[in-house]
Amino acid sequence: MVNGIKKMRKRSLLLLMPILLLGSFLSLLAISRSQSYLYYERIEFNYDGTTYHANLYHPTKKIDFQDKHPLVIHIHGFSSQKDTDFRGPLELTKRGFYVASVDMPGHGESANSHLLNTDENGELVTTQLCSKLLDKIEKLRIYSKIDEDQIGLLGESFGGYVALMNGLYDDRFKVTITWSAVTDVLKIFKLYEAPGYEFDKDDKELLKENNPVDVMNNGSKQPDNLFLIVHKKDYFYKYNKELQNLTDCKWEVFDYPVSSVSEAHAILHKNLVIKTINWFENKFFDSTSKNGPIQLSYEYNFYLIILTLLASLLTIFSLMIYFSKYLLKNELINIQAPPKKSIATESKTPESSYSLDKKKNIIIFSLSIPIFLSIWILSTLFFGWWASWFLYAPAIIILVYFLVFRKILHKKDQDQEKKFSLKDFFKSEISIRSIAYGAFCSALFLGFYFAFALFQPFLLFYPHNILAVILSLWFVPVYLSTEIFYRKILYPSSSFIKSKKTRTCIISLITIFIQLFLMVYYIMLFLPFNISFVITVAFMFSSLMNGIIYHKTEKIGATLLNTIIIVSIFVGASVSFLLNMYSMFS
């Protein structure tokens, strides 16, 4: 009785600690957010039959020297979305600006379209997107608080192209700032052309008619108060220089050391934000000091978000462990109480046999990781990334397990081997309680994720159509093969580690290493960083959760269900983007 009470107190304490930690970080994050904006509202606006989405941030600060507030429309870069890079929105709202961050066509919540969509008049949607968003904002009640002479644009990468063209065509935008802008859109789209995926003549003509370096000049044909910001090592530097020569606009060239072109393109330097704020305020307020000193906090906010996410993950793990006692009562009894061996049986198991098994398992454990990675890499090289992902690599891993590892790791007599079937295998890996527990864990994670992503807002991903959901199920062989590797090869071969908890922790660390390794590999091959990162993090989180699920159930059916539910949400969002890329080229 006393031991039971002590265990209950220990379990409650382990649950309470991460919850308190999460509460602390959420409080700090809420305080930090309140210094920038009071709240944000989700805006939908229709353009040529398609719905587009934006977040409108309402500033906390009141501007002392004027009654109304400036408005800046922020446009993200290619393969990103409106709530990924919050540097601009966070720092501008802190200074009294309204900021509307919009999803470009084919991105984020505006996924049911693509970048080359045209309206009924034959105009590129991207060149009118900000104007249509401004039309929507003008109809909102808060527009009475906005100074119509203080409306600007801020665009990153391809969002810089969108800002340039909207600023050119709509004189309501008084200031345009770009970060690493695409200023020659024809050159950029040419990079993505491949045999069978070339742009037709009409598309190229349309792009030429809306190409900044072709249509802008030093006369009146350029956005008002244009400011280009770029890094000298960026691939787009030469095209920004060409546009600057044509327009004689203000520009800033960073030249601090970087390790790659991608790092140069991102311009991860605090002076980028400071110069952006100064340009807006100089043009809107005729002063760079009237609105007070600039105190940046986006780095602090970013670290708080990371700590909050980690605390959320710890809380999810704690809740999974805590509720496993109630959801898996009978399962835990069966797992924790293995059949007793008779004295006669134990006497037939000499120490030398145990030592031999231990050495065998150490060898299998050590070799299985490079074998697993080699299968993915070699299948990609021989069969191509698409076929290797969905067919060859998963099939090879599953076959290697059933034909080789299973026989080595799970010794059975000849009669049992003859009776083996896939049906019996999967039946043994599924139970009602374990499936219910896996579903509970998935719901727990998704509840935390969507609550946080909407509260912040930060990295809200979900599939945008039924086709994306269906195509995300193509990843099921990938999920199955990875779960078989982690739970049926790594876990039993690590039996030389006596503590099951230690084994689960070590395999979790190996999971993180493997996912990061594959992410870097596939980025080097073909996938955009944002897509690779999102899928990798989803896989990583689900795999870490699966370590606990398998530790509690020893059923691969529960871990597979958890992976399918969680990862399909993020894969479906990525598939939506890839479908739009395909439709754009086809």
Image (cartoon, helix red, strand yellow):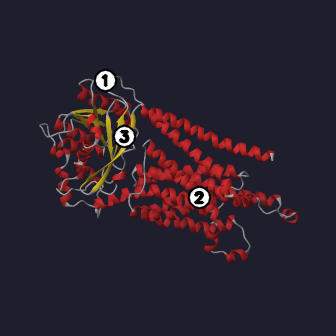
Q: Residues within 10 Å of mark 3 (few under 14, many from 20)?
A: some
The disc labelled 3 sits on which kind of residue? Ala
Q: Do callouts 1 and 3 mark residues in contact (Cβ within 8 Å)?
A: no
Q: Residues within 10 Å of mark 2 (few under 14, many from 20)?
A: many
Of pointers 3 and 2, the one earlier in the residue sequence? 3
- SS at badge 3: helix
Measured as percent of width and height from the top left, residue 160 is found at 27, 42
- Which numbered marker is on residue 137? none
The disc labelled 2 sits on which kind of residue? Gly
Q: Nearer the viewer, mark 2 or mark 1?
A: 1
Which quarter shows the C terminus?
A: bottom left
Measured as percent of width and height from the top left, residue 402 is found at 61, 69
- Distance of label 3 from label 2 (alpha carbons): 39 Å
The disc labelled 1 sits on which kind of residue? Asp
Give the residue at x 72% y 51%.
499
- SS at badge 2: helix
Of pointers 1 and 3, the one earlier in the residue sequence? 1
Tell me if residue 365 comes above or below residue 427 in the rendering. above
Mark 2 lies on residue: 438
Measured as percent of width and height from the top left, residue 245 is found at 18, 37
- SS at badge 1: loop
Mark 1 lies on residue: 64
In this orientation, does residue 409 appear?
A: yes
Q: Nearer the viewer, mark 3 or mark 2?
A: 2
